[in-house]
Image: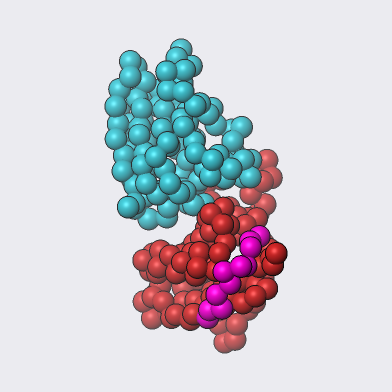
Chain colours: A red, B cyan
Amino acid sequence: MRDNARHVPETVERFLESTLESVDSAEELAVAIAEKAGFDEDDLMRIGMAVRESMVNAVVHGNRYNANKKVRFSVVNNAERYTVRIADEGEGFDYQEVPDPLAPENLMRTSGRGLFLIRSFMDEFQVRRLEPGGTEVTLVKYVVSK
Amino acid sequence: MSVKLNTRQVGDVTVIDVAGRITLGEGSSALRDALRELVGKNQKKLLLNLGEVSYIDSSGIGELVSGFTTVTNSGGNLKLLNLNKRVKDLLQITKLYTVFDVHEDEAGAVRSFG
């Protein structure tokens, strides 16, 4: 949640390589736009981490580092909603099938916490299958006016 | 900056000072390698000082869990020191905070190994 006194409308779209460098650059760009829009430090951390985890899913699990596949990354910041969309060109996977990382039997697993963190840190999280292939996730943080 | 690791000995406890970001890629693999090397050298009392860690992602959390399991399975103890608020919050929301033995004072942490 934030004070939108310094609201700055902004729309950015990038087509990124399927690399870990793209994960870093997407996170930096998302945080820079969110910072300019006036989100506080805690929200900047939450947004940055949610974007990082989503980009990792797109690059690693979606496109599997395939140099021929891109990640479409966009940020739309308006008066009510700060929205990030990340789309890969992978085969997709069922997000419902990811085990609950908080279940006692999964607590000591070394992976599987990314989606949980995204859902925890953003106000909305949606997943959409793309045709002919790929997955698009939408992350939303609400902009709260004073 | 990615991650910087420095290992020092305090009595029979090995303190690993970690600084920077523990994230997928170089950061988490450096931590994994360091812990495995120490376990390979039969170090049983490991204290991971995260005081200078600015950021940790789900991969980094996974490395902490992996390190904990590796050290425990080798008959050792891995404890955490100096968590900043963000790392502490992350371990709390992932329900891992109580899994680790977490300390805020190095001398007390060293003594706790017995």
**Residue A118, located in which quarter of the rendered image?**
bottom right
Question: Which is nearer the eye, B50 or B58?
Answer: B50
Question: Which is nearer the eye, A130 or A91?
Answer: A130
Q: Please report the bounds of the magenta region as a residue range.
A: A1-11
Figure check: B3 above or below A57: above
**Magenta span contains residue A4:** yes
**Magenta span contains residue B5:** no
Please name the residue shown 42% across and 36% down the image.
B51
The N terminus of chain A - image quarter = bottom right
x and y percentages locating residue A106 in the rendered image:
63, 45
x and y percentages locating residue B8 in the rendered image:
29, 27
Figure check: B106 above or below B27: above
**Residue A96, located in which quarter of the rendered image?**
bottom right
Figure check: A117 above or below A84: above
Question: Which is nearer the eye, A19 or B72?
Answer: A19
- Residue A117 visible? The answer is yes
Please name the residue shown 49% across and 76% down the image.
A73
Question: Which is nearer the eye, B13 or A93?
Answer: B13
x and y percentages locating residue A136 in the rendered image:
58, 76
Residue lying at the far bottom in this picture: please name it.
Answer: A132
The C terminus of chain A - image quarter = bottom right
